[in-house]
Amino acid sequence: MAEQIADAGGLEVRGLTKRFGDLLAVDGLSFAVRPGETVGLLGPNGAGKTTTLLCVAGLVRPSGGEVRWNGGLLGAERGRRVTLIAETPEVYAMLTVWEHLVFVARSCRLLDGWQHRGEELLERLGLSEQRDALGEALSKGMRQKTLIAASVLAGTPALLLDEPMIGLDPRGQRELRGMLEELRREGIALLISTHLLESAEAICDRVVIMKQGRLVAEGQIAELRQRRGSEETLEDAFLEITQ
Ligand code: ATP
């Protein structure tokens, strides 16, 4: 498996475990996300999705297991490989959108000329009008876009998003889907936790379904549906798998 991942590249989670006291929130979870692939992390409330994302991003220390990028264990350089955009995205309140990009450019020591790419990213993400707005004045969608711009500018190859559609209006959801599709085409590995099965169906190449910390199903959505009868919707399959 390790060799396969090294060949295919990407993010690999192996035997990830997280205990909170007696509770096993994540229980020996293994899956991979290739570059240019969008994987949906599904599961009922409390299944362990957010805990998984936090462990992969290095924001919570796992009790066991490992996370690799292109076959190498993620250590101190994890922030250069993986960005997590939380359900309530946090930006710096007193920095403008543009200053977030300046911050990234300085901390990643980007070569001069990054400004052109930064402006281009803001344009693509529809953020140019908010260029000089302070973080504290941004809506959820704008904060998400600011963090996506910062992550892309930094060249981070894996992006994790926790419930990114929640709180976005229909236009915002559509814009975000378009943006994620573009990132996927650029070769970013995307891992997205969501309860919105229609969104998962629209944007994910594969899904990983969790229940009580464990992986209970994994595969392409069409495949999961067919396994359970071709008439089934993803919702039917999800409810059966997680009942
Ligand atoms: P939801 O869909 O409701 O957001 P989830 O799949 O993201 O749920 P998690 O938030 O990862 O689930 O929680 C998994 C389990 O771990 C839950 O039982 C939760 O109560 C527990 N848990 C999460 N964080 C902690 C913590 N810091 N301390 C103790 N228990 C926690």
Image: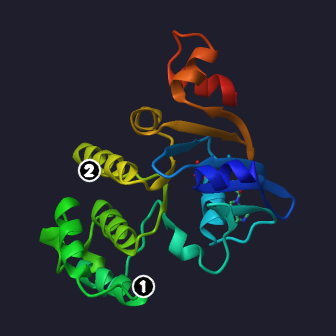
Residue depicted at x 30% and y 80%:
101
**In the image shown, does 69 or 107 lie closer to the viewer?**
69
Give residue 42's position: percent from left, percent from top: 58, 41
Residue drawn at point x = 48 percent, y = 52 percent: 190
In percent of the image, x 59 and y 10: which residue is there?
Answer: 229
Disc 2 marks which amino acid?
Gly
Residue at disc 2, secondary structure: helix
The quadrant where ligand 1 appears is bottom right
* Quadrant (top left/top right/bottom left/bottom right) for the C terminus: top right
Q: Circle 2: is it few (<14), some (14-19), or many (20+) Cα within 10 Å?
A: some
Q: Amino acid at mark 1?
A: Cys
The image shows residue 126 at horizontal and vertical percentages of 18, 61
Q: Which mark is residue 172?
A: 2
> Which quarter of the figure has residue 124?
bottom left
The image quadrant of residue 115 is bottom left
Dot label at residue 35: none
Label 2, ligand 1: CB separation under 8 Å: no
> Measured along the vertical axis of the image, is residue 111 above or below residue 234?
below
Residue marked by disc 1: 108
Closer to the N terminus: mark 1 or mark 2?
A: 1
